[in-house]
Amino acid sequence: MRVNETDLMAIRHLIACERQHRVASPKDLSEFLSISSAATAKLLSRLSASGHIRREVNPDDGRAQRLFASQSSHEEMRQALAGTHDQLMQVALELTADQQLAVVRFLDAMSAIAVMPSAEKLPNGTVTS
């Protein structure tokens, strides 16, 4: 795609927003990328000039911008990730049923810890502080 890492993260975020039927704004993108509004303005100018995104005026207020990944960005992202997705799927398909269960349990436990308030019980009965 010939873009830097921040640009790629921005494009991926816009695509994810579109898949979730959400409209991204420059402020949303600034917060997601943890960059200043000035850096976001430069990023948007660069991505717009290269044809990776399109900006539209929000019809509700006539001032705010709505951001979308271009169709070519969608296609380039699909092509860039297709091989990786195939490889990941192959690894998953090669797991035995017992291995799959172990992976699911591991990921469920990790997810529970990541979203739990600090003083809740862990699945094994211990309490965090």
Image: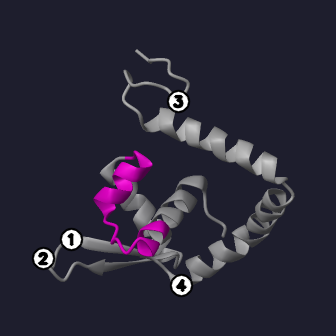
Q: Residues within 10 Å of mark 1 (few under 14, many from 20)?
A: some
Q: Name the residue under label 3.
A: 123
Displayed quadrant of residue 22 = bottom left
| Comparing labels 1 and 3, the label whose residue is closer to the camera | 3
Rate crowding at label 2 as few (under 14), some (14 to 19) or many (20 or more) other CA atoms within 10 Å. Answer: few
The span from disc 2 to disc 3 (Cα, nearest Å) is 48 Å
Q: Which of marks 4 and 2 is nearer the N terminus?
A: 2
Q: In the shown orientation, is residue 47 left or right of residue 37?
A: right
Residues at badges 1 and 3 in contact (C-beta under 8 Å)? no
Q: Nearest the camera: 60 or 87? A: 87
According to the image, label 1 marks what residue? 64
Classified by dominant secondary structure, the portion drawn in magenta counts as helix
- Find disc 2 in the rendering and name its residue: 61
Q: What residue type is labelled 1?
A: Ala
Image position, residue 124 (x, y; %): 56, 24
- The numbered mark, 2 or 3, whose residue comes first in the sequence reads 2
